[in-house]
Amino acid sequence: MNSDKALLLIPDISGFTKFVKETERTHSQHIISELLSIMIEKGSPEFKVAEVEGDAVFFYRLHDNPDTELIFRKAREIFIAFHQHLLLYEHKRVCNCGACSSAVDLSLKIIAHFGEIDFINVNNITKPFGKNIILVHKLLKNKIDSREYLLFTQDFGNVNQSEEAWDEVLSGETYYEDYGNIDYNYVSLKPLKNYLSEPVPEKTFKSAKPIIHQAVLPCKSYNVFELIANLDERGKWQKGVDKLIFDEKELNRVGSSHICVIGDKNIKFETISSKLDDKGKFVFGEKTSDIPLVKEINTYYIIEQIPEIETETKLTVEVHVVPYPVFGKLLLPLFNRVMLNNLKDLLEKLKLYCIEKENTREIEVSKDDVDIETI
């Protein structure tokens, strides 16, 4: 089998194990999937993907020499794109579960190595193979006391430290069984965070006299928030909507959109805000410009846990209408009456669905108790 020289590169997510173990599983999967996709996009086209490894991407590039400039450029592009995405997600997220609220704490370490590799064919899939493939993975476990760095083996030789944004280049070594002491250089990636762009706040509209309706729902505030903001759940209680169309690969966030199909009409909604204050009050907002007779409607769901009653939540819905000039203002009182009746009906259906969901949870908890006692 012929051997080829290659650059090997592994961006690995720091904090992944704790993140997945201690956070909401479904949302953590969405977040990690998005981050891996960004890493793959930024690693291409110079590098080919050999494997996606759960919390890392293993890249390789056939090359005759250890191209330090290319490694540093790719590390910079991947790291900045990774953290720009997390910063934007923190700014736009609507969910406050463990996964969504702690995603911003994830970081990235990048391992680079140069050496000879072979290839192996498994079920018509060709993959890099050999001792250097094993070594570059072993290098993920080292003595560097940091969560965000670029490690490159001595095969890369001297590094141009005049490169803007790079910190001091340090050296180290770690012992690996079958390989002995492996020397490497490493540099902190933290200074690259200075190149991140702060997200621009979204502008939202609120009228002086919104349409308001309230209801007390028999479940915890976070569960109510999930029924409203989680579009999978939304389609189960929002009666009158024939179909809900949204990107199932993306978590709902500021800027996300979904379409309500009602008969032959498609009404597009965009998520415009979400926040959680220090009193535990959730506020979720969305807007649409597809309702006849009005220019725009902004709807805010204000979700408050009733003090000392853990199983009850007060939900206030505010509808802020932007009418068209002249004719729209004349029709506004009629439109408001119709909208208020729709709100009453909507919250009644949500209340019934809450009761159904809570009964289902009680049954599931009872089954768990039986299983535990049986064991």
Image (cartoon, helix red, strand yellow):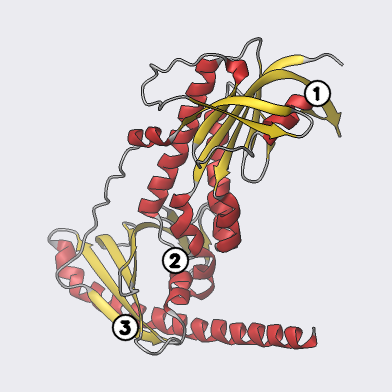
Front residue of 314/310: it is 310
Mark 3: amino acid: Gln
Q: Which quarter shows the C terminus?
A: bottom right
Earlier residue among tags 3 and 1: 1
Marks 2, 1: nearer the viewer: 1
Q: Residue at x 69, y 35 (%)?
A: 138
Mark 2: amino acid: Ala
Q: Residue 178: horizontal and vertical position, in percent? A: 79, 31
**Which quadrant of the figure has residue 53?**
top right
Q: Which residue is mark 1?
A: 119
Q: Residue 314: horizontal and vertical position, in percent? A: 35, 83
Q: Callout 1 environment at 10 Å: few (<14), some (14 to 19), or many (20+)?
A: some
Position of residue 169 relative to residue 104, above or below, is above
Query: Disc 3 versus disc 1: distance between alpha carbons?
Result: 65 Å
Q: Which residue is mark 3?
A: 214
Q: Which quarter shows the N terminus?
A: top right
Mark 1: amino acid: Phe
Front residue of 111/85: it is 111
